[in-house]
Amino acid sequence: MSKSIVANRYAEALFELATEKGQTSVIQDELLEIKKAFQANPDLGELLENPRFPLAKKKELLATLFKDANSLIQDTLFVLLEKKRINEIINFVDEFRGFVNDAAGIADADVYSTRPLTDSESAAISSTFARKVGKQSLRINNIIDPTLIGGIRLQIGNRIFDNSLVNKLERLKRDMIGS
């Protein structure tokens, strides 16, 4: 999750509106697609931040690009544009997702392993570590990292649980050198 206060405020406002209208899931899905669009096209963000490009043209561009998006999202994009905060779009989407996750008792987790995890392994990791961070479940993103040699490394927010063989060997090495 980002550390942007501005993005957090806008995300919280949209989350409250989306919750009132029962549209959090739909809006989250659409926002993730918008995030992908901005990440895949960094020139888009630069163009929308360019002071030489008139605000009316910027709005027209956004309206064209995201014509099928939910009206709450379109309105939010226009507000971000008008307030010269469109550069916060990635952080904004991450913050919104954080609000949705918190409401559902879910946390995102990156699980590093030497091979793809099976469904049962993912479920076991989710149930075990979700309790440790006060959540009901984890949304696992499995990342293959052969340098671990064995075991797993798990990152949930700013918390890291490292049970990899390479980490165990490092600890053993430090213990042997230290004694």
Image: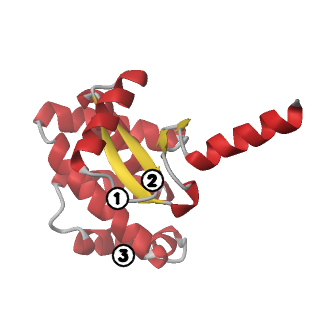
Spatial distance from mark 2 to mark 3, Cα to Cα?
A: 47 Å
> Which numbered mark, 3 or 1, is in the foreground of this view?
1
Q: Amino acid at mark 1?
A: Pro
- Is residue 106 visible in this depiction of the protein? no
* Badge 1 element: loop
Quadrant (top left, top right, bottom left, bottom right) of the C terminus = top right
The residue labelled by disc 3 is 57
1 and 2 marks in contact (CB < 8 Å): yes
Q: Is residue 139 or residue 86 the one in the foreground?
A: 139
Q: Amino acid at mark 2?
A: Ser
Image coords of residue 112 (percent x, y): 46, 52
Q: Return the residue at label 2.
A: 113
Q: Residue at x 15, y 31 (%)?
A: 20
Q: Is residue 23 above or below residue 179?
A: below
SS assignment at label 3: helix
- In primary-sequence order, the first of circles 2 and 3 is 3
| Residue that badge 1 annotates | 116
Foreground residue, 142 or 29?
142
Q: Amino acid at mark 3?
A: Lys
Could you give the CA–CA distance between mark 3 and mark 1, rounded to whole angstroms? 46 Å
Inter-mark Cα distance, 1 to 2: 7 Å
Residue 37 at x, y = what percent? 34, 70
